[in-house]
Amino acid sequence: MPPLPKRGFDNNGQDPAKYTPEEKAAAAIVEKWIETINHDTDGHMALIDDNILVRADPTSRLTRGPAAYCSTFLPGLGSHTGNYPLTELYVVGGKGETDVLVGRTDFNAPPGGQGFLGGYGVPVASFLRIRNGKIIEWEDMPTNKISAGGLPFRVQLDGPRRTPAWCVKSTDGSNSARQPGAVPAHSLNYWYGTEKAEYFFNPFEESAAQTVRAWFAAWPSGDPLLLGAFTDPDVIFRARPSDEPGHGRDNLLRQVCGITGGKRKLIDLFVIGGDYDSSVLTRWDETNAQGNVTHMASFFRAQNGLITEWMYDTPLDSTPSSGSPGSSERNSPACQAVNAALGPASAAPAAVAQ
């Protein structure tokens, strides 16, 4: 069918034949990640970095390490008997790292089986960062209200956990299989989607796409207060991968006041979402005052037309820098305007669990 008019100027699909080498390798790792969930804990944990950042649900704290990952990753590992097919995959990467947004359907038990939603497919989006052949960050986001994150009661996902027996071998530091290895071969025996034209977006995905486009349109103005119009009051954010998670729209605007402005061109926008949550992965170019172009990626979550999470701007061709952005520009006119509009700063963000 002929392409229908789009609201944005960004691309919404990918041709795997045109992946960069880093994107091709990352897609293969994610295929292996899915393929090993049910029956190969050692092979699955061989893909996990020793310092992985972990969050099983947006309501959970960010934790760190393979033991936290193996103990928290609800689908598949160990004695689980579910099925977790990959439905969509979008990959944006370079020589620094590769970011991946995937959609999967979690069948947590066979039809008629015992347990939570046995036999019912639960749609989930996952965000993964991959560097040097390892998954260095994993976060799950339910997309529909039937999932654990959208239930009317709290599902406790935080707090101390006993490391399951099947995790010990892969998390005690003695598993030689967790050393870097060759890129996995194609391992899935089914197809998944890599292209979703905008006329196939559901209403929640379309809303999220428009919200993220508005963020990019507002940024070059240099006025961080404009970003507040598209940001949830309880937004979660990290301005750099090494930053501790921040909370609240006012704190986000103070964080970015010294770096807003400049030319940003949105190139690719990939979205997976539903009535509870939508995740958006973007590729974009930043041009500085000298005309130099940096290829970048960013991850967002959006609900009800507002950004609920911003997961930093990642330079694709180099390792992201540490520390907070804009520290030398705190006295800029933009920051002074933010401080005048918002008043005293609120409490500091919570620390990342070690």
Image (tube, rainbow, N blue to C red):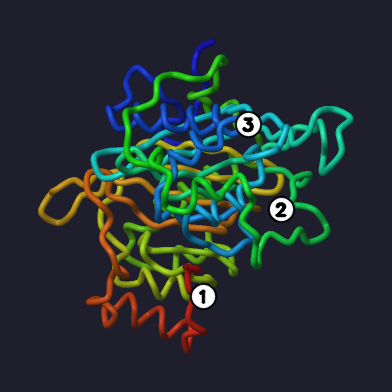
Please rate how many residues cluster around mark 1, counting C-alpha atoms within 10 Å: few if below 14, some from 14 to 19, many from 20. few
> Which x, y percent locates residue 213?
46, 47
Amino acid carrying mark 1 in the image: Ala
- As drawn, the label of residue 38 is 3
Query: Which residue is at a point 49% across and 41% down the rendered structure image?
Result: 45
* Residue placed under numbered mark 1 in the picture: 350
Please rate how many residues cluster around mark 2, counting C-alpha atoms within 10 Å: few if below 14, some from 14 to 19, many from 20. many
Please name whichever residue, 69 or 292, is drawn nearer the observer in this view of the structure: 69
Please name whichever residue, 190 or 294, is drawn nearer the observer in this view of the structure: 190
| Element on which disc 3 rests | loop
Query: Which residue is at a point 49% across and 51% down the rendered structure image?
Result: 171
Amino acid carrying mark 3 in the image: Asn
> Which x, y percent locates residue 240?
35, 62
Q: Is residue 129 visible?
A: yes
Numbered disc total:
3
Label 1 vs 3, first from the N-terminus: 3
- As drawn, the label of residue 292 is none
Label 2 vs 1, first from the N-terminus: 2
**Quadrant location of the N terminus?**
top right
Q: Check the image and report above or below for 27 versus 56.
A: above
Determine whether, in the image, residue 200 is placed left or right of residue 13.
right
Please name whichever residue, 104 or 80, is drawn nearer the observer in this view of the structure: 80
The image quadrant of residue 125 is top right
Please rate how many residues cluster around mark 3, counting C-alpha atoms within 10 Å: few if below 14, some from 14 to 19, many from 20. some
Label 3 vs 2, first from the N-terminus: 3
- As drawn, the label of residue 149 is 2
